[in-house]
Image (tube, grey):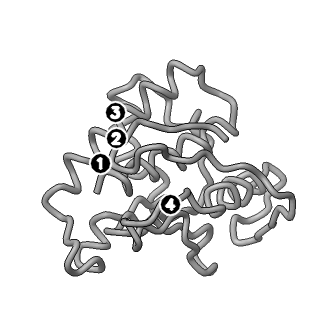
Amino acid sequence: MRDEIATTVFFITRLVKKHDKLSKQQIEDFAEKLMTILLETYRSHWHSDCPSKGQAFRCIRINNHQNKDPILERACAESNVDFSHLGLPKEMTIWVDPFEVCCRYGEKNHPFTIASFKSRWERWELSQGVRLAVSRASSDDSSGASSDEESRSKEPRTIPKVSNPNSTYQVKRV
């Protein structure tokens, strides 16, 4: 559960950093609160033996009907961050499931994997999906383009490696 939540927080904070409206300290405070809230909230809804059980509960969602996810809104309130300064896409769904974190931009697009932890005994890296997902979110510009429209970056990029997969906080840049 910790790896999946750490990946989710890392992914969301990457989106927030890309928007460039918050200071480094504000992002750290928000990330810390979000991590704590997700751990508290998901603890009783985590079913490793049946990962799809409780999936709707572990969904972080922003769309036209719900423009502020309650968990993200709570993390903002507890870290004194203005939700609008997060700069998140207008339509985004993140599923935080045992062994996998997935995302979908727009309501009609297909979900994609941000990170998979299905082979926990092997050394793993965060998926290129984190970088791609951040790029997709960035394409939701103010020109009125829908988040249903996708753009893909062909440029190879370096993804941080977790030096200790059992630790939520140990991240090494490569």
> Which residue type does callout 3 highlight?
Lys
| Residue that carries the numbered disc 2 in the rendered image | 35
| Residue that carries the numbered disc 4 in the rendered image | 124
Side of 106 relative to 152 (left or right): left
Q: How far is the residue under mark 1 from the one under mark 2?
A: 5 Å
**Residue 35: horizontal and vertical position, in percent?**
34, 41
> Which residue type does callout 2 highlight?
Met
Q: How far is the residue under mark 4 from the one under mark 2?
A: 21 Å
Element type where label 1 sits in the image? helix
**Residue 135: horizontal and vertical position, in percent?**
74, 55
| Residue that carries the numbered disc 1 in the rendered image | 38
Q: How far is the residue under mark 3 from the one under mark 4?
A: 26 Å
Closer to viewer: mark 4 or mark 2: 4
Query: 92 and 125: which one is in front?
Result: 125
Asked if the residue at tag 2 contacts the one at tag 1, i.e. Cβ–Cβ closer than 8 Å, the answer is: yes
Q: How far is the residue under mark 1 from the one under mark 3?
A: 9 Å
> Which residue type does callout 1 highlight?
Leu
In the rendered structure, which disc, 3 or 4, sits on the residue that comes first in sequence?
3
Which quadrant is the N terminus positioned in?
bottom left
In the rendered structure, which disc, 1 or 3, sits on the residue that comes first in sequence?
3
Q: How far is the residue under mark 1 from the one under mark 4?
A: 22 Å
Going 21% across and 51% down the picture, which residue do you hit? Answer: 41
Closer to viewer: mark 3 or mark 4: 4
Asked if the residue at tag 2 contacts the one at tag 3, i.e. Cβ–Cβ closer than 8 Å, the answer is: yes
Query: 20 and 116: which one is in front?
Result: 116
Going 27% across and 38% down the picture, which residue do you hit? Answer: 36
Instruction: Give the quarter of the image for residue 131.
Output: bottom right
Going 57% across and 70% down the picture, which residue do you hit? Answer: 104
> Which residue type does callout 4 highlight?
Trp
Q: How many marks?
A: 4
| Residue that carries the numbered disc 3 in the rendered image | 33
Q: How far is the residue under mark 3 from the one under mark 2?
A: 5 Å
